[in-house]
Amino acid sequence: MDRNALNLKHLRYFAEIARRGSVTAASRALHLAPQTLSAQLRVFEESVGQPMFERVGRRLVLTPQGATTLDYANAIFALGDELSSVLQGRARPRQQVLRVGVMDSVPKLLTLHVLQPLVDRHRSDLELNCEEAPQAELLGRIATGELDMMLADAPVPANLTRGLHGMEVAASGMSFVAARQLANRLAAKFPDSLDDAPFIAGSAPGSLIGQALEAWFSRHRLRPRIAGHVDDSALLKGFAQAGLGVIAVPTSIESEVLDRYQLRVVGRTDEVKQTLFLVRPRGRRMHPLVAELEARFA
């Protein structure tokens, strides 16, 4: 046992003395001899290296360290009582916190599409913390335990597979959508109509989906006119709604995009896939909600 580990029995004795204001009163409540309780208090103070009380007349007054310790003790024992009630079926468990990192290149509606069933099932007891960042930052935070999982549009890098596990949770073809007037003009002769049509790129050229779209345009001998590069997926759809150009979105979220932004379909292809991966640490106990997600997509 760690010699520096906190002895909860000693902590409870200390807390009882602090609440009662004297060793004598606490000893009666705990059914211990005052001499025994005083000895246990000395052991506790020696183990933490701090005096818990100072004597003022006949009264024991908490030192600043003692007051801090009592605050923690009250929280610890309240949590223990709560756990006991939960395990005995007399209370509901407290909220589960799920910390999710999302790559900044993943469409927000696709993230919602994957997490929505979990939210629906655990709405009353879930605290969902989502953070968006580049892949390298999120991989580092996964490795250090700051995140329970991440959603990425690229697989785990080969040099990190010993410490991280990734599984595919979504794969979708791509839909090309635009504002009504532009979509009506381009839909009839898709995909040829995309040649010299205004196109808003939503992913960096070096990203997997960006490379896949470039390769698809090349195979079909299409050279869209780049009307803009917009990293933020919500802003991308907003510019499409304003008529700036055509955008590509995963077909799996096409209906939500059309409804929310009043866009129309120009055409679809299954030759380009938007893939989403769930990434979690290996070698640590899996968060139960991450395990539930994995089971759903297995």
Image: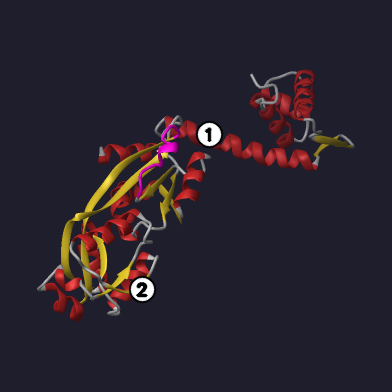
For the C terminus, the image quarter is: top left
Residue in the image at 37% along x and 70% along y: 229
In whole angstroms, how far apart are the C-alphas of marks 2 and 1?
58 Å
Residue identifier under label 2: 228
The disc at residue 81 is: 1
Q: What stretch of residues is rendered in magenta?
A: 154-163
Instruction: Find out whether residue 184 is within the magenta segment.
Output: no
Q: Does residue 192 appear left or right of residue 17 in this picture?
A: left
Q: Position of residue 18 (x, y in %)?
A: 73, 35
Residue in front for this viewpoint, 159 or 156: 159
Q: Quick one: label 2 or label 1, which is nearer the N terminus?
A: 1
Determine contact: label 2, label 1, CB under 8 Å.
no
Q: Secondary structure at mark 2?
A: strand
Mark 1 surroundings within 10 Å by alpha-carbon count, few (fewer than 14), some (14 through 19), many (20 or more): few
Is 129 situated above or below 263? above
Image position of 234 with respect to 1: above or below: below
Identify which residue is drawn at 41% across, 53% down: 103
Closest to the observer: 8 or 143?
A: 143
Tag 1 secondary structure? helix
Q: Amino acid at mark 1?
A: Asp
Most distant residue in the right direction: 57
Residue 234's x, y, as percent?
Answer: 35, 67
Kind of residue indicated by mark 2: Gly
| Few, some or many residues within 10 Å of mark 2 (<14, 14–19, 20+) | some
Residue at the location (35% across, 60% down)?
Answer: 108
Image position of 166 with respect to 190: above or below: above
Residue 178 percent coordinates (x, y): 23, 73
> What colouring style does the render use?
secondary structure
Say whether residue 163 is visible: yes
Q: Nearer the viewer, residue 39 or 123?
A: 123
